[in-house]
Image: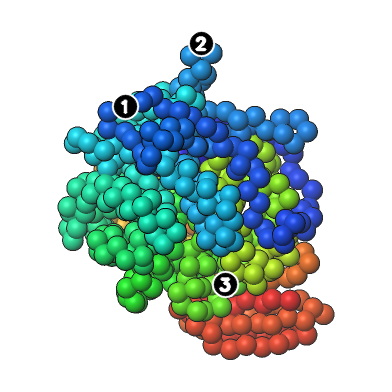
Amino acid sequence: MNARWSARLTAVLGTAALAVPLTTAAAAAPAPAPAATASGALTNLEHLDFLLDEATPPADVAGHSTYRQTEEPTLLAPWTYADARDGGTFQRVGGGPLDAATGDWGQGAYNADDNTRAAVVYTRHWELTGDADSRQKAYELLRTVAYHQTTEGPSAGNVVLWMQPDGELNPSAEPVELPDPSDSGPSYWTARTVWALGEGYAAFADDDPAFASFLKDRLALSRGAIERDALSKYGQYVESDGKKVPAWLIVDGADATAEAVLGLTAAGRAGDDTSATAARQLAEGVAAMASGNTRQWPYGAILPWAQSPAMWHAWGSQMPAALAEAGDLFDDEALVKPAIADATGFTTTLLTAGGPDNGWYPSPTDRVQIAYGADSRVQSLLALADTTGSAAFAELAGMQAAWFFGANHAGARMYDPATGVTFDGLQPDGTVNRNSGAESTIHGLLTALALDAHPAVAERATALTSVESRVGLSYVEAEDAVRTDGTVFTPESSWTGESSWSGDGLTLQPRQSASWDLGPSDTRRWIEPVILTEPGEKSLSTWRGGGVLSVTGPAQGISPTPGALLPASLTAPVSGSDVRVTAQSGALTLDGLIVRPWISRLVLGGDARSELVHSSAIAPQRTSIGTEGVPSTVRVYDDQGSLLRTTATPGVVTVVLPAGGFAVAEG
């Protein structure tokens, strides 16, 4: 529960950012091959077990109860954070300042978000392995999840986020979070409660019918809150910066909604028809957030926030996973199609650009990487692999999951199967936050569980422990122009309310110009200027080699601020290193240039080798793939993930990539 509280949530939730202990260390040495547990599995619950503690809430708290509370008054929950200490040990801590006199934390020791996701971990581990201890912990955690729910009054079905060490709920945290109190409106924690209760109900349906019946009732309680606060607007659309967006997403978020869909589809498979109906309706809203195409921002991604068409973040990005699960349950290709486009167009772009960055807003501004973001991508790719049967998504999942085992820009192992520790984050400069709180631990384990369920993918992911080379999307700051007679300025705040400036900006008045040196490239490149426009404001500019660009500021709609900071696509690719623009009419205000090569490439190494080449061109492209003297199997896929051809090669081979297609070489 750390870096996901980024710029977006600062805007959505006010001062909701949680207190995150940040301890960094020097960039790690190249990661050794990970050691599996004694059973040979990657999943090791030891560190999550360490985070668990017991709390006994006061008796007879109005609106809060759980299964067999009189007989079993003690609840189980993971501490929110774990600070790294000398000797590889950790200290469990809560959120916010500690009041030494009362033992309370400003926020709390435990939280509903981590309780729900920990419940999913133990439930999935029990289902995968039959482990009795995991079954018991899943049972205990699901009881805790239910206790956080408000069971009566106008907020029935919503969820109190924080709990103190003694079990007392803290509806109003310090610093203040919105909604405040935390059960007074729709929230991420309500969506995650539905996720846990849905998977829990499905798991216990045959094993313990009485407990499953309780979980089904509590699922209906929170589903009712979603029906009241979100699905009451099912089928309605609103406008956000000129884009038509669904009005029935939970907290306007496809990310939050997707996690609810995961639980609802699980319950639907177990025979809960009402949950299945809600899953379909919510999934349709998630699918409606697909945007862009092969060559235009955001390259087929399913965007997370209806209030901004200018931002994508990796944390919580399980939208494709939810659509794959729902599409499979309902046998609906219309739900699966946006998930495929996200994987083939956007995820390939993300992998070749540097991996699961926290946020592109729309420029790659927040390049911190955390387990939540990496796991969300892995879950989505593996869900697509299971739903479609295409090896394309399994191969991409192996390359993405390798992030946990050293194939990242620090060469650091982020998850250790020998201890179950997942580090809290990877900084852009290669330093590692070596704390290991509940959120990171949980999402490292969710990836480990998914890999244990897909042994061939696990074998590939754990063998890839280094990044050998990478060529992909890059960014040039507007103020770094080599020549300009325009005006460089510093925004009052980097956060606009719905997007983020990457640094300073540059304004060109009519007849003013600027030019940039992109450096050499062996492929043509798309250029997308990131431009700020006010509603109705127009600008016309000419780009040498890129054509004429006309931009009109969109209507604000439900977006938080009237101005939009959005990429605009030039009509032609750039073939050289020099880019020059001249403003013709209206002021042209630039944040920078997104530069995207026609052919992007990622090579991972270690005990195995995987290479990805991806085309953003609009026509077939020839390119090489493979390494001289290294035998490999090359598979070429189209932009739907369909296999076109397979080639066994002793070294380098030339392939033809279809428009938007990609190839993977495994050796």
Query: Circle 2 is placed at which residue position?
Result: 101
- Which is nearer the N-term, disc 3 or disc 2? 2
- Which is nearer the N-term, disc 3 or disc 1? 1
59 or 528, nearer to the observer: 59
User: Which disc, if any, is residue 29?
Assistant: none
Query: Circle 3 is placed at which residue position?
Result: 394
**Left or right of residue 534, residue 374 in this image:** right
Tag 2, which secondary structure? Answer: loop
614 or 20, nearer to the observer: 20
Q: Amino acid at mark 1?
A: Asp
Distance between mark 3 and mark 1 Cα atoms: 49 Å
Q: Which circle, 2 or 1, is nearer the viewer?
A: 1
Q: Amino acid at mark 3?
A: Ala
Q: Residue at x 19, y 36 (%)?
A: 154
The x, y position of residue 280, in whole percent, is 28, 65
- Which is nearer the N-term, disc 2 or disc 1? 1
Query: In terms of image quadrants, where is residue 25?
Result: top right
Q: Residue reaching furthest front? A: 71
Q: Residues within 10 Å of mark 1 (few under 14, many from 20)?
A: few
Distance between mark 2 and mark 1 Cα atoms: 25 Å
Q: Is residue 388 above or below residue 227?
A: below
Can the viewer see residue 429 in this picture? Answer: no
Query: Circle 1 is placed at which residue position?
Result: 60
